[in-house]
Image (tube, rainbow, N blue to C red):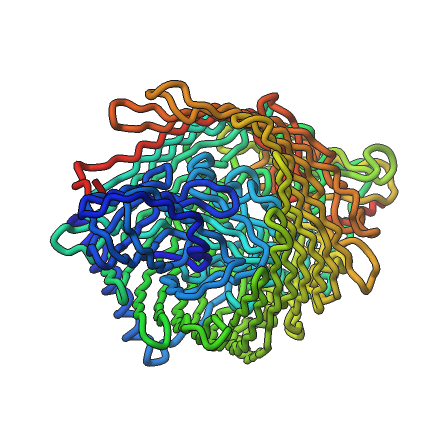
């Protein structure tokens, strides 16, 4: 019966404790809201062997708490046709000042992430081809850095998707990868 | 001590006594239920003149021996029945039969030991101790699915909450041991924090019932009531064990009751439950991260004298729940990919481990109850303190130990109730309620709903007038509720303070008539109202599972419901029927309306805004039981619901589909050692929900799942090992490993419902060398 007595005492104690201390208005602590790991920007840093070095951003400046459909600020991906470039993808939170580089975290947890690229059109004028993607810490695809080969002069689009905990690390498309989309950017492509 | 209204010693059925003429009289007493003739057990009868207490056995009987000729006052105490008093004059040995009825019948000398009495005439249905035992190990909502007209809204097999006549969450009031349960019912994935093993009886009141139970009871009320504390000297215990094959879940629960010989007023109870299950299985696949663990305990101490008493109760509920990893999708495209896939997108094996996303929820309830019988009537004073703490662990890039959401909800309630003595022809009760509540998150948490404080007060009166074969009941209640909310807004997330107050009157009017001996009809008109909840006013977050953003509206007005219910109980030979027709009009019904797509860095989301319309819900719950022979019995149940918005003249979304079920049971005794043997087969057919809004395809995809048929079976028996009874049962759910999806399951987008599940249940009631008082 010891247990019961303990329980009962506890019940009594709790009851009266609360009844007693609620008299003075206990201050409710205000939240310091913080959107967990907010991403605002996907930035492509594009280089070639001849000294070309430019970056292109896709930025959506709204998290939640905002009823308006966000308008992305997007740079046109202007590159030369029939050339090969080295691309590195950066993931940033530009709501902070200075901007927070989320890429560091993504790289630390590289086996839980996968970057995916999709070109429209897939071939021909305005298309892009991808090869030699970087590997994660377990030797599987990660693609945070990749080689990009441009097609004939023309226009198209490039979709870059960052997946978190993909089920299939060998996926070529976002659908096949499964997992959760952390960020997705669509760049207009202009090859001229 | 825990008794609800309801009963009355209705009539002394027959007193047949035979001459003897000394102090050696012996009287056999039988107490049975008026409606079905079932014995009432357990029932305590206190006889003033003898200063003794008796308890009925399972056949509803006890024997008073060696008594003298004279007049005796019998007090009847039974769980879910009212404390009733009857005087009888005993001149000879023989048999005394009492039939006790339910609340349709008037209470004359009535003392009620619970804080909130049941509205007399409202349509209701109950699960008794046997029903609860037959379903032990299930969560509360799954257990309640056995009540016609009640469904469950769920997130897979482990998280479920009850739906009464199509409505759920904040539209249902749960009374846990007489205290209104205040846990965080903000979404479909927030299940009620109640251990069903606490319950000796669970009652569902269907339809608006604000007068009795306060605001929010638009759809109905679920009353979870423990059995009364032991009143006879001695100790008893009960051990429950259950094992489930599908998720390899084990459940153990034990209760110990004690009453002191030297201090007959003092009763004690201790109870505890532990549950652990791993990933569950749908046909062909394991479902990733769907483990469950639960540990609950409770204790009660009662000091019950005949006309006054006190009781202290404390309960602790704690659970860890895994949430299917594949149900957390990034954006609309991810969700569509998951829907298109014919197998779970996250492969898994079996494990008991629970990873992110997961929930950890605590609920503590401390309650003190005092009661006193006086010339005015029976007074009850109940104070309750509830602490609810919910943690949600999101899937994060960084591996951190913290939860991303830590919400605390503290509630204090005080209720004073007087069950007054009859005033002329009127019997009834009056009372006042007070509530104080605060809800807050921790600094750094994901903003989910705003911090808020709330205070409220209410006063009510319910009176009954009893004619010969009819009862008229009327009730009125006034509620006032005040809220102070702190909502972070805009880019700088500046906290803005809001103040809201609501007040309203609600009422009930009911008539019950015993048309013939075998036909009872009741008609109830009632209303209820509900203030908009903080999530409806302020939510501005996204639902991972549904890949959508929900936006609150600060200008929402309270919801108000008007309910009309007609119930008929009719028996004819071997057939007994129970028909309940209801229609409910809800003014300012709060619902989610789809809006523009929202583009974020994660891609597109659907947005939904809380809006108001007028809704009209009508339906029928039909039960028919046919007793083929004394041993064979079949029950057919049907439940139908038509839910429409009156403004758009369209169907309401996410309403349960019509369903039919047929149960056939054979019961028999095989000798002294093997009793109450039963074999039972259940067949259930759930229709496709074709009553969906015209714009369904643009707001929800895919269409509601197809109709399905399910078959369950079970066998059970009571084994008598000497004097020790052991109850055993073996059930098999979804016998054919049927692949199906349920419209009310939020995981219908991703995975099937669970496959075959085998459950073994053992129940051992133990009596410890108790002194036999009644021989």
Horizontally, is B274 left or right of B664 in the view?
A: left
Snapshot quadrant of residue B734: top right
Residue B540 visible here: no
Q: Which quadrant is the N terminus of chain B positioned in?
A: bottom left
* A172 in relation to B407, above or below: above
**Residue at position x 20%, y 56% in the image:** B51
Camera-nearest residue between B68 and B619? B68
* B682 in relation to B336, above or below: above
Camera-nearest residue between B753 and B546? B753
**Residue at position x 51%, y 77% in the image:** B484
Q: Find residue B312 and report its horizontal and vertical position in percent.
A: 27, 61
Q: Find residue B545 and report its horizontal and vertical position in percent.
A: 61, 46
* B607 in relation to B677, above or below: below
Horizontally, is B775 left or right of B682 in the view?
A: left
Residue B261 visible here: yes
Q: Find residue B305 and report its horizontal and vertical position in percent.
A: 23, 62
Camera-nearest residue between B444 and A138? B444
Q: Find residue A176 and report its horizontal and vertical position in percent.
A: 68, 31
Query: From this viewpoint, which residue is outermost toward the top?
Result: B671
Camera-nearest residue between A74 and B415? B415
């Amino acid at each position: 019966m010891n247990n019961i007595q303990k329980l009962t005492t506890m019940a009594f104690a709790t009851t009266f404790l609360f009844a007693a201390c609620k008299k003075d208005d206990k201050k409710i602590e205000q939240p310091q809201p913080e959107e967990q790991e907010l991403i605002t920007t996907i930035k492509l840093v594009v280089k070639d062997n001849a000294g070309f070095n430019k970056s292109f951003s896709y930025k959506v400046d709204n998290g939640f708490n905002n009823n308006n459909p966000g308008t992305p600020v997007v740079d046109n991906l202007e590159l030369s046709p029939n050339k090969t470039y080295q691309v590195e993808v950066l993931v940033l939170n530009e709501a902070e000042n200075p901007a927070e580089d989320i890429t560091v975290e993504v790289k630390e947890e590289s086996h839980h992430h996968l970057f995916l690229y999709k070109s429209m059109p897939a071939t021909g004028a305005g298309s892009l081809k991808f090869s030699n993607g970087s590997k994660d810490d377990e030797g599987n695809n990660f693609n945070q850095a990749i080689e990009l080969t441009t097609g004939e002069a023309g226009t198209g689009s490039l979709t870059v998707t960052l997946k978190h905990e993909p089920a299939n690390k060998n996926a070529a498309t976002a659908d096949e990868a499964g997992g959760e989309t952390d960020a997705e950017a669509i760049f207009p492509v202009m090859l001229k | 001590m825990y008794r609800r209204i309801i009963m009355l010693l209705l009539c002394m059925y027959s007193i047949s006594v035979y001459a003897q003429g000394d102090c050696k009289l012996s009287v056999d007493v039988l107490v049975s239920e008026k409606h079905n003739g079932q014995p009432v057990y357990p029932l305590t009868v206190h006889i003033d003149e003898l200063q003794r207490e008796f308890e009925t056995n399972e056949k509803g009987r006890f024997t008073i021996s060696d008594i003298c000729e004279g007049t005796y006052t019998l007090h009847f105490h039974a769980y879910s029945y009212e404390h009733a008093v009857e005087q009888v004059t005993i001149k000879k040995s023989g048999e005394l039969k009492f039939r006790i009825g339910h609340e349709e019948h008037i209470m004359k000398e009535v003392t009620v030991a619970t804080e909130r009495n049941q509205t007399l005439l409202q349509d209701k249905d109950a699960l008794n101790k046997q029903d609860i035992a037959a379903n032990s190990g299930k969560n509360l909502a799954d257990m309640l699915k056995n009540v016609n007209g009640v469904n469950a809204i769920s997130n897979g097999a482990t998280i479920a909450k009850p739906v009464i006549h199509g409505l759920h969450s904040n539209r249902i009031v749960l009374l846990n041991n007489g205290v209104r349960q205040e846990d965080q019912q903000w979404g479909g994935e927030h299940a009620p924090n109640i251990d069903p093993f606490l319950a000796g009886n669970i009652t569902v009141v269907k339809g608006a019932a604000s007068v009795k139970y306060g605001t929010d009871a638009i759809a109905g009320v679920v009353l979870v009531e423990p059995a009364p504390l032991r009143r006879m000297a001695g100790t008893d215990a009960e051990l429950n064990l259950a094992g489930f094959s599908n998720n390899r879940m084990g459940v153990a629960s034990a209760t110990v009751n004690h009453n002191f010989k030297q201090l007959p007023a003092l009763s004690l109870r201790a109870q505890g439950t532990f549950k652990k299950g791993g990933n569950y299985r749908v046909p062909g696949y394991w479902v990733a991260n769907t483990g469950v663990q639960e540990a609950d305990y409770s204790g009660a101490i009662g000091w019950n004298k005949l006309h006054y008493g006190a009781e202290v109760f404390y309960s602790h509920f704690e659970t860890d729940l895994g949430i299917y990893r594949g149900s957390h999708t990034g954006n609309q495209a991810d969700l569509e990919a998951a829907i298109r896939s014919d197998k779970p997108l996250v492969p898994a094996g079996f494990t008991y481990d629970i990873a992110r996303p997961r929930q950890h929820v605590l609920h503590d309830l401390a309650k003190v109850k005092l009661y006193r019988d006086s010339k005015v009537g029976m007074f009850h004073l109940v104070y309750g303190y509830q602490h609810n703490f919910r943690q949600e662990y999101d899937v994060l890039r960084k591996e951190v130990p913290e939860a991303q959401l830590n919400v605390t909800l503290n509630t204090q309630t005080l209720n004073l109730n007087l069950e007054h003595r009859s005033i002329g022809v009127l019997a009834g009760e009056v009372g006042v309620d007070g509530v104080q509540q605060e809800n807050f998150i921790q600094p750094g948490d994901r903003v989910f709903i705003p911090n808020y404080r709330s205070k409220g007060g209410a006063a009510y009166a319910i009176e009954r007038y009893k004619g010969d074969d009819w009862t008229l009941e009327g009730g009125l209640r006034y509620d006032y509720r005040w809220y102070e909310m702190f909502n972070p807004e805009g880019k700088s997330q500046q906290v803005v303070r809001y103040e809201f107050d609501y007040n309203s009157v609600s009422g009930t009017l009911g008539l019950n008539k015993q048309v013939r001996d075998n036909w009872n009809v009741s008609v109830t008109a009632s209303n209820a109202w509900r203030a908009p909840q903080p999530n409806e006013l302020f939510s501005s977050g996204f639902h991972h599972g549904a890949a959508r953003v929900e936006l609150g509206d600060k200008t929402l007005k309270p919801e108000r419901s008007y309910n009309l219910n007609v119930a008929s109980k009719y028996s004819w030979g071997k057939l007994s029927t129970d028909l309940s027709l209801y229609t409910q009009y809800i003014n300012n019904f709060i619902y989610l309306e789809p809006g523009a797509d929202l583009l974020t860095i994660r891609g597109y989301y659907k947005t939904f805004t809380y809006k108001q319309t007028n809704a009209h819900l009508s339906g029928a719950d039909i039960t028919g039981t046919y007793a083929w022979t004394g041993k064979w019995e079949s029950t057919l149940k049907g439940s139908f619901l038509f839910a429409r918005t009156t403004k758009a003249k369209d169907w309401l979304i996410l309403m349960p589909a019509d369903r039919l079920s047929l149960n056939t049971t054979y019961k028999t005794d095989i000798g002294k050692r093997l009793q109450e043997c039963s074999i039972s087969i259940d067949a259930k057919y759930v229709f496709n929900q074709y009553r969906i809004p015209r714009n369904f395809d643009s707001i929800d995809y895919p269409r509601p799942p197809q109709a399905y048929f399910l078959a369950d079976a079970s066998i059970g028996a009571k084994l008598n090992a000497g004097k020790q009874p052991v109850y055993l049962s073996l059930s098999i759910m979804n016998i054919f490993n049927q692949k199906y999806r349920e419209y009310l399951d939020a995981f219908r987008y991703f995975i099937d419902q669970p496959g075959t599940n085998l459950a073994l249940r053992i129940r051992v009631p133990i009596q410890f060398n108790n002194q036999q008082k009644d021989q």
